[in-house]
Image (cartoon, grey):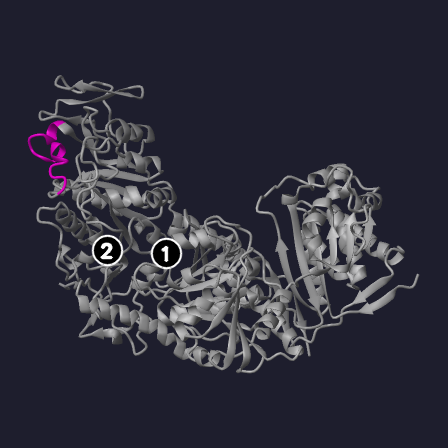
């Protein structure tokens, strides 16, 4: 029997030699571990992976990866990724950002990256607060949140990141949470495999400045009543006894009791259906809606070509039509020769 | 009638008309014909900032200034010998440029009541008839009528015929300055023949009509001849500053064997660079229209991290937005080039007008100590050399580089002797190899003897590393808050940029002796005006030399010594004295400023006066 020798990388092999320096109990640790695990499962060679980040707690991420990494400036990770992806489309590029970095100072680049659909994976760590600058409100902070910059409570309306990404034309929109490792791993894997810009919002607990912000969705007692885990082809069901869910009356969703079995018009999740995705990210997204929050792959459109594919196609077409000749380019159309 | 022929060394013509009247095209075609005749040329287009300014108004005037001559022409000229004014507004806005006794050709139809009112002449006043133009050779033509007559048998509408009247003017001037029509015909055919043969034919007919009118009309007693310039042999073309920048970068990337990633956000007067780059996909150019200037420079940095040349071009407001990312590029030590096509500021300022007021921003406009090499182009054609050199320095030294150009160079054009690709200096970036590893480990900030770090790019197994904006430990590049390490890194980054001066050519005088009474020191687009002014003063016997600085950071090693060889130093600048401040601070010399901040170039005449005054005041 021949033995096939192959270097199989484990999650540990994707870690760098740097000491991880997030606060004890920070949700970022769990995300780091799952990302490393997913890369090992997908067997992506380390040298072909690049992590790009902006500024903030989440943006320290690249330093802890044993891959290539660029810790940029505040909000600009997608902008840095443009140049890298356009010139090196074969690389696996991950963008790690937070609710402040990605939705406030870098909001412009995020929406344009999603619109352009470059083949990158975007992880937005949402902790609804600025951590590294010590606790100010972020664009996802909830009304009433008291912070050093809102001592009497915030009165700003928050962004709903998945709705924003969907509205910007993202071809992959998902939500997961730091405290459900299996779910996070499966969502991250799907995101990494998506061809195009994949946007993943990760509910991430900040134990120092916003502890428990997402406990309603992540803790054993409250999770079943508040978190709705969607799966392609499966009905939208939740509750401790899995006895509640949604039906669709036309395009109007209604919360109903499923204890007597699934009604005929039960809402079956179809991640490729734009209309259903719009309802999922919008209606079930806002705080105080009284409705459960959906988790999982909310929308995925694998059909739209990526920016890199469209560019490559155009380049090929033009290269055939206009062969490059540098000397001729320098001369231009109207040149003449002067002899002595 | 036998026409007299007069030989003259150079001529300046200004074509001025409404922005829809084709003045730019007329000027450019005449310039090309002159270049083909063996003259040296310099041009300067001037158009309104508004895309469709109201017709007939002062704001709607577009003009094209052209100088051609039998010697090395360095500027489009202070004043013109011939002014073509297609309407009253064009006359009003450009008459000040016409020399006394100069030839003034006007289109009578552009001076009707409506045009006079739009140009702001009081009711009942017409400059063509009130004697106010008596010190010029006024030639009033009813061009519209002649065009209409020449195209009487065609089906073009009055409006379409009106749009072609520039061709009549072009034909007339071709006769006046003895330019053969064949070359202009070729240009017209190249532009219209395939798209619309009828238009091409009508244009050519008008060219001949204008030419023949000059020949037969008794209005013109004189015809001018401008002998060929003595230019070195070679292949020539006319080129604008922005075009030359593009070609310089393309040539550099090709020479280095890299992709050229270009990111830009639309802004006057740099957009042309984005447009040109966007046509060059087959040349390994990767053009990208970013959502703002911040994205543009960050994308360039991303491309450089990936192992390619990242370039962006912008103007003042966009350059300000790029400041933070430029600091990141300094920290990362990656090869990107940023071109600032300067325009009059601050803020939106005067977007189409030149100024040199971003020098100190280019040198110092970043937080922290963030030294960046800065180069400035002297002429439109010199933008090629400057771009190539900037890319070469960026790639050889792993550093961002800033190129300063301005609205005057960007849109102006002159003759370019095209270098062969072979003659361009080689570019060899310091890509990382196994030899860069210490005990099998790659350290991204392990510098070579010049202080340059190795370039390891994603895809290279065993070289995985992380870099970022946080201060990094010397050699390893790991994040470090160590006080002494920070100071050391600040010094290492500065020393690397300073060391570039070792390989730069020593500063020489552009004109004159390397010592004397007065050195006139300039940088950027004022080169031509200063050179001509110094030339004139020297012909008057004055002890004056011209020093033109291309490398503004690091400054040439011998510059201080050179400056100290002169009793006086005069620094003419299109700002309030930025270079002179730098020279004073750096060399403790008494550099005096000649400042002009009007959004227009320096004239030779004003510089001659300034030089005379400086020497006179001893």
Does B93 sit left or right of B490 as displayed?
right
Q: Residues within 10 Å of mark 1 (few under 14, many from 20)?
A: some
Alpha-carbon span between mark 1 and mark 2:
36 Å
Asked whether residue A72 is in view, the answer is: yes
Magenta region, residue range: A209-225
Label 1 resides on the chain identified as: B
Q: Position of residue B71 (x, y in %)?
A: 69, 73
Label 2 resides on the chain identified as: A
Identify the residue under disc 1: B323
Q: Nearer the viewer, residue A153 or A82?
A: A153
- Work out whether B391 lies above or below A289: below
For the residues beneath circles 1 and 2, the answer to whether they share a chain is no
Q: Residue at x 58, y 77 (%)?
A: B544
Q: Residue at x 72, y 41 (%)?
A: B121
SS for callout 2: loop
Q: Nearer the viewer, residue A234 or B102?
A: B102
Q: Quadrant of residue A232?
A: top left
The numbered mark at residue A44 is 2
Q: Based on the picture, tell me whether residue A121 belongs to the magenta stretch.
A: no
Q: Position of residue B77 (x, y in %)?
A: 66, 63
Q: Residue at x 17, y 65 (%)?
A: B482
């Amino acid at each position: 029997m021949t033995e096939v020798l192959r270097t199989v990388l484990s999650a540990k092999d994707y870690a760098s030699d740097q000491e991880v320096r997030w606060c004890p109990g920070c949700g970022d640790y769990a995300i780091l571990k799952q990302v490393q695990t997913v890369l090992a499962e997908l067997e992506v060679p380390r040298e072909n992976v690049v992590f790009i980040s902006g500024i903030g707690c989440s943006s320290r991420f690249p330093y802890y990866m044993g891959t290539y990494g660029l810790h940029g400036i505040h909000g600009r990770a997608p902008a840095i990724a443009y140049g890298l992806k356009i010139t090196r489309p074969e690389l696996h590029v991950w963008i790690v950002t937070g609710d402040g970095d990605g939705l406030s100072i870098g909001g412009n680049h995020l929406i344009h990256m999603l619109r352009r659909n470059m083949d990158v994976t975007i992880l937005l760590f949402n902790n609804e607060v600025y951590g590294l600058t010590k606790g100010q409100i972020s664009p996802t902070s909830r009304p009433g949140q008291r912070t050093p910059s809102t001592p009497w409570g915030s009165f700003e309306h928050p962004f709903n990141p998945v709705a924003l990404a969907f509205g910007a034309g993202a071809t992959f929109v998902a939500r997961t949470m730091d405290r459900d490792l299996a779910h996070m791993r499966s969502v991250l894997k799907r995101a990494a495999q998506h061809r195009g810009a994949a946007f993943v919002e990760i509910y991430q607990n900040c134990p120092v400045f916003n502890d428990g912000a997402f406990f309603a969705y992540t803790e054993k007692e409250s999770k079943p009543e508040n978190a709705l885990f969607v799966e392609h082809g499966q009905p939208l069901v939740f509750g401790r006894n899995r006895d509640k869910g949604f039906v669709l009356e036309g395009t109007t969703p209604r919360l109903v009791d499923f204890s007597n079995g699934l009604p005929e018009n039960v809402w079956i999740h179809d991640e490729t259906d734009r209309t259903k995705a719009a309802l999922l990210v919008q209606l079930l997204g806002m705080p105080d809606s009284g409705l459960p929050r959906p988790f999982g792959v909310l929308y995925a459109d694998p059909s739209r070509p990526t920016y890199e594919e469209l560019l490559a196609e155009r380049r090929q077409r033009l290269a055939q039509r206009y062969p490059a000749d540098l000397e001729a380019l320098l001369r231009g159309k109207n040149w003449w020769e002067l002899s002595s | 009638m036998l026409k007299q022929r007069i030989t003259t060394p150079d001529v300046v013509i200004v074509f001025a008309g409404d922005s829809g009247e084709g003045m730019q095209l007329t000027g450019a075609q005449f310039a090309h014909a002159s270049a083909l005749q063996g003259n040296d040329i310099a041009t300067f287009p001037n158009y309104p900032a508004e895309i469709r300014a109201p017709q007939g108004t002062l704001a709607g005037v577009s003009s094209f200034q052209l100088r051609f001559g039998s010697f090395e022409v360095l500027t489009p000229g202070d004043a013109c010998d011939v002014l073509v004014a297609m309407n009253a507004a064009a006359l009003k806005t450009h008459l000040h440029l016409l020399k006394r006794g100069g030839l003034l050709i006007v289109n009578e139809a552009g001076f009707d009541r409506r045009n006079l009112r739009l140009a702001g002449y009081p009711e009942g006043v017409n400059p063509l008839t009130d004697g106010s133009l008596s010190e010029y050779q006024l030639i009033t033509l009813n061009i519209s009528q002649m065009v209409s007559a020449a195209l009487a048998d065609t089906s073009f509408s009055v409006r379409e015929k009106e749009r072609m009247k520039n061709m009549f003017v072009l034909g007339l001037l071709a006769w006046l300055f003895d330019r053969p029509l064949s070359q202009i015909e070729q240009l017209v055919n190249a532009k219209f023949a395939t798209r619309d043969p009828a238009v091409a034919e009508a244009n050519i007919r008008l060219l001949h009509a204008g030419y023949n009118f000059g020949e037969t009309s008794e209005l013109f007693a004189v015809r001018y001849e401008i002998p060929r310039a003595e230019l070195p042999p070679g292949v020539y073309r006319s080129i604008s500053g922005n075009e030359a920048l593009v070609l310089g970068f393309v040539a550099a990337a090709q020479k280095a064997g890299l992709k050229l990633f270009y990111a830009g956000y639309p802004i006057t007067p740099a957009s042309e660079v984005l447009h040109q780059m966007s046509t060059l996909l087959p040349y390994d150019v990767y053009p990208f229209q970013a959502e703002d200037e911040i994205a543009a420079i960050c994308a360039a940095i991303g491309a450089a991290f990936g192992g390619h040349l990242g370039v962006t071009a912008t103007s003042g407001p966009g350059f300000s937005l790029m400041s933070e990312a430029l600091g990141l590029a300094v920290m990362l030590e990656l090869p990107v080039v940023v071109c600032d096509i300067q325009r009059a500021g601050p803020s939106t300022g005067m977007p189409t007008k030149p100024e040199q007021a971003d020098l100190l921003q280019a040198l110092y406009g970043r937080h922290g100590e963030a030294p960046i090499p800065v180069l400035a182009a002297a002429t439109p054609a010199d933008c090629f050399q400057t771009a190539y050199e900037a890319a070469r320095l960026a790639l050889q030294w792993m550093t961002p580089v800033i190129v300063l150009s301005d609205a005057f160079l960007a849109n102006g054009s002159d003759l370019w002797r095209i270098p062969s690709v072979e003659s361009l200096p080689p570019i060899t970036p310091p890509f990382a190899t196994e030899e860069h590893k210490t005990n099998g480990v790659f350290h991204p900030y392990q510098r070579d003897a010049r202080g340059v770090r190795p370039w390891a790019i994603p895809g290279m197994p065993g070289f995985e590393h992380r870099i970022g904006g946080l201060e990094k430990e010397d050699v390893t590049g790991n994040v470090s808050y160590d006080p002494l390490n920070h100071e050391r890194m600040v010094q290492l980054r500065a020393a690397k940029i300073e060391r570039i001066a070792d390989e730069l050519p020593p500063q020489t005088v552009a004109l004159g002796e390397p010592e004397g009474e007065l050195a006139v020191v300039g940088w950027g687009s004022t080169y031509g005006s200063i050179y001509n002014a110094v030339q004139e003063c020297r012909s008057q016997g004055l002890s004056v030399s011209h020093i033109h600085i291309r490398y503004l950071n690091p400054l040439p090693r011998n510059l201080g010594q050179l400056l100290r060889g002169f009793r006086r130093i005069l620094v003419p600048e299109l700002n309030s004295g930025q270079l002179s401040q730098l020279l004073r601070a750096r060399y403790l010399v008494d550099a005096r400023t000649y400042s002009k901040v009007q959004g227009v170039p320096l004239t030779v005449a004003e510089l001659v006066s300034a030089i005379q005054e400086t020497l006179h005041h001893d």
